[in-house]
């Protein structure tokens, strides 16, 4: 697991973040109207750190990641505004050709389902070789050597024979290791991991999370970890962004968020966890369900499920503002004092 | 283990899937998905079967309801306290069909388990008409009542499954399982596909229904935090065998089998101040076609000894009601 001694303060000495989203908006034209899947998302990620993005299905966390990679199909997707600053430069201004040089090279991504993300008709070796031959101009022999060393690096036993195997010959955990080997093959500075362990068993999940954080420590890359599992976030992230209905509702360091969640949605999420420590009592729940992306409520989007919502919440969108006395902890709620009593 | 009013006593349950090879389709081996498991289930009790993919927990649940034909074993079912026991595996199809009223199942995938062309009301009411229990307006009333029971409005009965969210579909699945007033429901990963806040709603619903109708659950799951929350007793499975059983406190506070310990250690705790420095299990689950000799777990076990690869450890009592199949478990002398 990530070493908690990697202090966020260490890398915060004034340097610009590796990745910064500013009011990013990615919408989709669908039959029902305009789906505002990502609607004004701002967060930043510093070098060598892990940012956990949490939220339920349909909150826009994966679409945000695809937008960073420039992988949202357009149409039906459309860019409705905002900036994606990578090393200070806006990725949305880049041409498709320029994005291709960044994608897989400087920014790599791993997905939830390693079986569908790998090509079944190529050997795993070929799939790693393709990346380095394309991006780094290696010849086939060098690329093969590199593929074998990458497989070894991600902990695949007997890489010399595994390099010639096909994805179906590997277990789920091994396939995810191969995905990571492909993603890491060009030594990216940013790894986007979209639910990387959701499809895996808990013992294999622990192995994969260990692997990601070991590689991160060795290479100093940043990780954008998208997950719905608050346990995974607690174990690996430095900062956390909580998303709801296309917006970030709360952003803080992991210690701050878990000890002092302030947005009613974050509070509700924590309360609905069946905790390992205390059993027996009735679980608290968040009433209702996530609104559809084509018909978000006006004002604060959580108000339809919030127990302390007022007329103000319906008329005015709360901005993501820093807490008094804790400038690094931002919350988008009109009623912070009432929320504290929840 | 045996009590006079247990709902269910399962012994030696086996389910093998034969493997055929070659042009003559010779029988060359078996996938021993469930390889001789014993468990009991009391009234209004929740027993969880836990373990990783491929450990046989789902196969065990389905074999129990004879949705898969068990290879061996017996499942003694006692419909009422004091009534005579019947062996579910020895019944004719016809008698089993009548008993199915008592035995229901809820599936993991609320998208795949509802027929997209049948309205929700018909899906729930079908069992009532098949078993000749209710018809016409009486059937409609029962369907409305069931929908209300699981927290849905009765007027949704004419809608189709695609109009519902995942959590609502799971409620429909639960309503359908409740239609015939069952005594036992097998919940096969019933909350695994749901978001945290929706999962909590469904867990609470299952708890309320258990209390109201005196239901017993066999809860098949891989998420141990949910299991800890919902269960009375837990059975941990590895490669087709139960390696440890006990009350939820015994399993979580005082695990004895190294596999149980590893499984618990692997759970990511939602508390950043408790980042684990624990040693994680290495390697994958071996193939159930040719499981390791002796104790199936010895290839991944951090404390395995030489004899673990030769002999199969028997279940032994550690405390009252707490059994583990490991040579190194702390065996209680009193029980």
Image: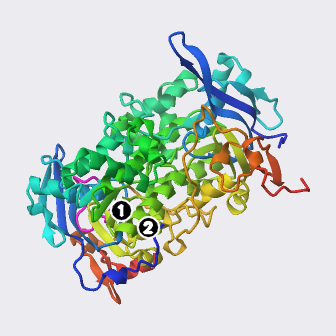
Q: Is residue A208 magenta?
A: no
Q: Tell me if mark 1 has few (under 14), some (14-19) or many (20+) residues whose alpha carbon lies within 10 angstroms of its own.
A: many
Q: Is residue B47 visible?
A: no
Residue A225, label in figure: 1
- Left or right, residue A314 beside residue B172: left
Q: Residue at x 35, y 83 (%)?
A: A10
Q: Chain of mark 1?
A: A
Bounds of the magenta segment: A292-306
Residue A17 on image: x %, y %: 24, 75
**Helix or strand or loop: what does disc 2 sit on?**
helix
Residue B187 on image: x %, y %: 57, 41
- Left or right, residue B30 beside residue B6: left
Residue B183, label in figure: none
Q: Is residue A299 magenta?
A: yes
Q: Residue at x 47, y 44 (%)?
A: B171
Q: Chain of mark 2?
A: A
Q: Residue at x 51, y 49 (%)?
A: A201
A162 shown above or below A15: above
In terms of depth relative to the viewer, which is nearer, B198 or B281?
Answer: B281
Q: List the single residue furthest toward the bottom.
A: A325
Q: CA distance from mark 2 to mark 1?
A: 9 Å
């Amino acid at each position: 697991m990530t070493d908690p001694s990697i202090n966020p303060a260490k890398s915060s000495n004034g340097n610009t973040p590796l990745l910064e989203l500013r009011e990013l908006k990615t919408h989709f034209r669908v039959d029902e109207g305009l789906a505002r899947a990502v609607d004004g998302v701002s967060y930043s990620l510093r070098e060598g750190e892990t940012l956990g993005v949490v939220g339920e299905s349909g909150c826009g966390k994966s679409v945000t990641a695809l937008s960073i990679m420039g992988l949202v199909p357009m149409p039906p997707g459309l860019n409705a505004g905002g900036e994606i600053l990578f090393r200070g430069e806006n990725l949305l201004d880049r041409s498709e050709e320029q994005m291709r040089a960044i994608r897989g090279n400087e920014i790599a991504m791993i997905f939830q389902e390693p079986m569908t993300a790998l090509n079944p008709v190529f050997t795993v070796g070929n799939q790693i070789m393709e990346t380095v031959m394309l991006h780094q101009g290696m010849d086939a022999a060098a690329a093969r050597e590199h593929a074998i060393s990458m497989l070894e690096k991600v902990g695949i036993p007997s890489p010399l024979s595994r390099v010639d195997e096909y994805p179906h010959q590997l277990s789920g955990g091994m396939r995810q290791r191969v995905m990571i080997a492909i993603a890491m093959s060009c030594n990216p500075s940013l790894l986007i991991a979209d639910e990387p362990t959701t499809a895996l068993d808990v013992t294999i999940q622990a192995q994969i999370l260990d692997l990601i954080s070991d590689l991160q420590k060795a290479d100093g890359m940043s990780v954008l970890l998208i997950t719905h599992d608050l346990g995974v976030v607690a174990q690996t992230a430095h900062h956390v962004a909580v998303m709801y209905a296309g917006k970030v509702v709360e952003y803080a360091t992991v210690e701050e968020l878990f000890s002092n969640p302030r947005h009613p949605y974050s509070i509700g999420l924590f309360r609905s966890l069946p905790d390992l420590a205390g059993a027996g009592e009735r679980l608290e729940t968040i009433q209702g369900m996530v609104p559809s992306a084509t018909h978000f409520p006006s004002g604060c989007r959580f108000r339809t499920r919030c127990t302390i919502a007022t007329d103000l919440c319906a008329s005015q969108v709360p901005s993501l503002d820093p807490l008094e006395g804790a400038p690094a902890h931002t919350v988008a709620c009109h009623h912070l004092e009432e929320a504290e009593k929840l | 283990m045996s009590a006079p009013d247990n709902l269910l006593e399962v012994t030696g349950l086996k389910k093998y899937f034969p493997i055929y090879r070659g042009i003559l389709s010779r029988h060359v081996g078996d996938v021993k998905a469930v390889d001789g498991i014993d468990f009991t289930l009391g009234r209004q009790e929740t027993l969880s079967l836990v373990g990783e993919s491929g450990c046989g927990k789902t196969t065990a649940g389905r074999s129990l309801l004879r949705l898969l034909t068990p290879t061996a074993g017996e499942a003694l079912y006692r419909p009422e306290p004091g009534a005579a026991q019947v062996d579910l595996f020895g019944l004719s199809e016809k008698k089993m069909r009548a008993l199915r009223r008592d035995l229901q199942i809820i599936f993991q995938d609320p998208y795949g388990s509802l027929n997209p062309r049948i309205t929700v009301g018909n899906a729930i009411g079908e069992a009532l008409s098949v078993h000749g229990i209710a018809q016409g307006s009486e059937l409609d009333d029962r369907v409305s009542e069931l929908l209300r029971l699981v927290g849905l409005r009765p007027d949704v009965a004419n809608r189709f499954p695609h109009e519902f969210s995942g959590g609502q579909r799971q409620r429909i699945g639960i309503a359908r399982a409740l239609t015939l007033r069952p005594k036992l429901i097998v919940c096969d990963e019933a909350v695994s596909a749901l978001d945290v806040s929706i999962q909590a709603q469904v867990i609470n619903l299952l708890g309320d229904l258990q209390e109201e109708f005196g239901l017993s659950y066999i809860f098949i799951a891989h998420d141990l935090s949910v299991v800890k929350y919902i269960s009375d007793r837990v059975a941990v499975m590895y490669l087709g065998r139960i390696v440890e059983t006990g009350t939820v406190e015994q399993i979580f506070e005082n695990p004895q089998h190294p596999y149980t310990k590893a499984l618990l250690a692997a759970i990511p705790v939602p508390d950043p101040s408790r980042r684990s420095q624990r040693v994680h299990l290495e390697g994958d689950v071996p193939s159930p076609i040719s499981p390791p000799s002796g104790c199936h777990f010895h290839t991944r076990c951090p404390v395995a000894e030489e004899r673990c690869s030769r002999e199969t450890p028997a279940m032994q009592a550690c405390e009252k009601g707490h059994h583990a199949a490991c040579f190194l478990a702390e065996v209680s002398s009193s029980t």
